[in-house]
Image: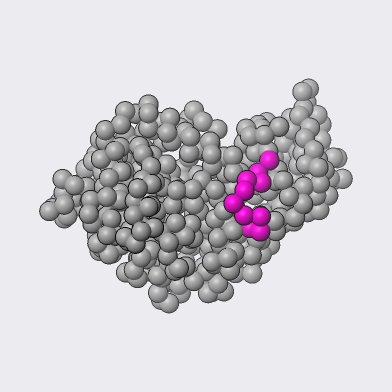
Amino acid sequence: MATSKKKKTTLVIKNIGQLVTMQGPVPRRGRDMSEIGLVTDGAVAVSGDEIMAAGKADDVSREIEPAENCVVLSADNRVVTPGLIDPHTHPIFARTRELEFEMRVMGKSYMDIARAGGGIRASVRHLREMEEDKLYARAKKTLDTLMSYGVTSIEAKSGYGLSTDSEIKSLEIIKKLNEQEAMDLYPTFLGAHEVPDEYRERHEAYVDLVIDKMIPAVAEKKLALFCDVFCEEGVFTVEESRRILEAAQKAGMKAKLHADELKSTGGAELAAEIGAVSADHLVCISEKGIDLLAASKTVAVLLPGTSFALGLESAAPARKMIEKGVIIALSTDCNPGSSMTESLPMIISLAALKLKMTAAESLSAVTVNAACAIDQGERLGRLEPGLPADMVIWDMDDYRELPYHYGVNLADVVIKRGKVVVGE
Ligand code: NIG
Ligand code: FE
């Protein structure tokens, strides 16, 4: 068992029935996705905001040098995992869109609603009208709910502003949330989420605006680590996506892509070719797309909650992707249009039922591999000495209850950087 040099212990979790350390290869591909670094009769010792030791209780106890006021928690023989990572969220929006959900229930499609001026463009109109402090407060609610479900880090996209000012405003809210709230947010600029109302007849001019004005402004203010594009029939083409993402890469951002969600357009191929950090959705990925991703470091972020909430039967070919060695992560896609949920555990249930992923594979997908999808594979998603002490004590005796006991919240205690933030 690896340990870090002697420091005072500020938090101990003892009596852990199953400790999921996720120690092992980063990222996890193929059969390695089933390896979750499972330790029975475990314990974790924390110093400040870092893990000191995580492993067998007997080994960990040798490392403990309690500080004054050291907090000792008992997991009561239940399960402890790293804090979950949600690598694809759209939390900066003004209002929910439940009427569209009902329209879909009554038979309209997501694209019908978008073409009629609803969808993302409706959210853009809402966001532009709302003051910053109200947007902040609404987004904070989303973060708090995510955290209550065991999520301790997220990727967070702009994309409901679609003007230079309102995209900057959205990214500044993400920055402020990151500074002020317990959740860590990894920001993504998504100016190419849709073409806003005022550019409907000037699609090309909007692509130019993203490249010539928005990307330089975002880069100059250092507001985003990543740039994403909604590459989809009727939104942005593969060629437009390539131009936007290459411009972003030149400006110092890493590429992400909403790819092959509703139609197969070659999005996965583009993501692999330009070395994107992730390609997301991939419900309609081609055989060639799978092969190219398997040979790349691009993480495939699968979002089964989106197909579920759109009422679609379709699902990404996860089994084939895992067999071929694609790096798979899972995410909520939390957004007011196509996937209104903050429950990453519910996504794990859907991954089991719709993507045929085991509990262990899904745990890899929301820890180590999700960390890679936000370019943090070196430091997040594992319980190892020296890494941030982000953990969850779950109200279950066996980690396989996570997909099985669906639609309820089993996250009992959430610890962020060594502090209890939910529960106890
Ligand atoms: O990931 N696909 C594009 N973006 C979101 C939907 C956004 C919306 O409908 O508001 C998604 O599914
Ligand atoms: Fe999305």
* Residue numbers of the magenta segment: 403-412
User: Residue shown at 65%/49% (left/top)?
Assistant: 382
Q: Nearer the viewer, residue 292 or 178?
A: 178
Q: Main secondary structure of the magenta part?
A: loop
Is residue 9 shown to the viewer in this render? no
- The correct choice, above or below, for 343 with respect to 404 in the image is above
How far across and how far down the image is residue 160, in percent? 31, 43
Camera-side residue of 172 and 5: 172
* Residue 194 horizontal/vertical position (percent): 27, 52
Rendering coords of residue 36 (x, y %):
69, 58
- Report x, y in % for residue 240: 24, 59
- Compared to residue 84, the image places residue 276 above or below, namely below
Which residue corresponds to the image point at 53% horizontal and 63% vertical from the top-left?
327
Farthest front residue? 106
Q: Which quarter of the figure has residue 325?
A: bottom right
Asked if residue 198 can be seen in this view, the reply is: yes
Q: Is 320 above or below relative to 181?
A: below
Position of the C terminus, as image quadrant, is: top right
Residue at 83% from the left image edge and 49% from the top image edge: 41
Nearest the viewer among 296 and 146 is: 146
Q: Is residue 406 magenta?
A: yes
Residue 268 to residue 147: above or below: below
Color encoding of the figure: one colour
